[in-house]
Image: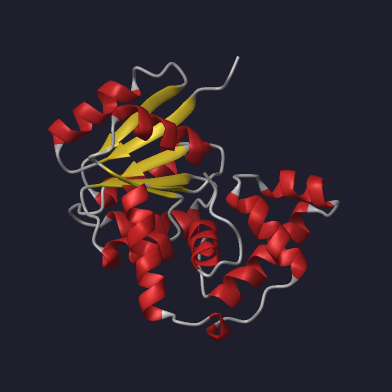
Amino acid sequence: MNKSIRVLLADDHAVVRAGIRQFLDQDPDITVIAEAEDGEMACHLIETHRPDVAVLDIQMPKATGIEVTRWVRAHVPDVGVLVLTAYDDSPYVVAVLQAGANGYVLKTAVPKDIIQAVHDVNEGKSVLDPAIAYKYMAHIAETNNAKAEYELLTERELEVLLLTSKGFTNKAIGVQLGISDRTVQGHLANTYGKLQASSRTEAVMKAVSLGLIPAQP
């Protein structure tokens, strides 16, 4: 039997939280264990409950979803972060990905896609709403016009990044390539530096936009 995915839900609108919780609760593999009405409460509850996935809005009192994401990456990095918001502006997209979120989905998405996004983030995959992916890649194209601006990735780093884009964990990548998961993490760290990225999602998106690896379906 699959272990239930423990979810924390943070949004400053009670009606929105209730609506999201209603359809998340319909999935037998998801359990909403706590709700937060502001960013400060979200950090406290994440530290207390250590959920598998934190579903965050961007605009919240006391701390934004972006600030909460940065806090999670600094203090409880094993917690997956899915940003669920109405904002699709490029500055928000860039800030969220640079903060280290695993996924960015718009509230206009259908419930089944949001449920799938929770599953994907729990499995260590990167999730981007198609409209968000397009905006982010357009942003990269505008601000970085040439591959020469980035230090070239080694063949091994490209192999690791390609498997990362397919949603494999560090351990699974290590098994496929015959290296340790610590070595995989080292290659990813080098890749982040070369691509000026701060998360798996951002590194994959930059690599796809630059044509270094193919986009995954």
User: On the rendered image, what quadrant is the N terminus found in?
Assistant: top right
Name the residue nearer the viewer: 121 or 143: 143
What residue is at 62 percent from the left and 52 percent from the top?
Answer: 164
The image position of residue 70, as x and y in percent, is: 40, 60
| The quadrant where residue 179 appears | bottom right
The image position of residue 31, as x and y in percent, is: 41, 23
Judged left or right of residue 80, residue 59 is: left
Judged left or right of residue 25, residue 162 is: right
What residue is at 27 percent from the left and 51 percent from the top?
Answer: 39
Name the residue nearer the viewer: 144 or 189: 144
What residue is at 33 percent from the left and 31 percent from the top?
Answer: 34
Name the residue nearer the viewer: 89 or 98: 89
Q: Is residue 115 above or below residue 138?
A: above
- State how the image is colored: secondary structure
Judged left or right of residue 194, residue 139 is: left
| The quadrant where residue 183 appears | bottom right
The image position of residue 87, as x and y in percent, is: 22, 54
The image position of residue 171, as x and y in percent, is: 73, 46
Quick one: which residue is furthest to the bottom in this view?
A: 148
Quick one: which residue is furthest to the right in this view?
A: 178
Judged left or right of residue 95, residue 197 is: right
What residue is at 75 percent from the left and 52 percent from the top?
Answer: 181
Q: Number of labelled discs?
A: 0
Q: Is residue 155 above or below residue 118?
A: below
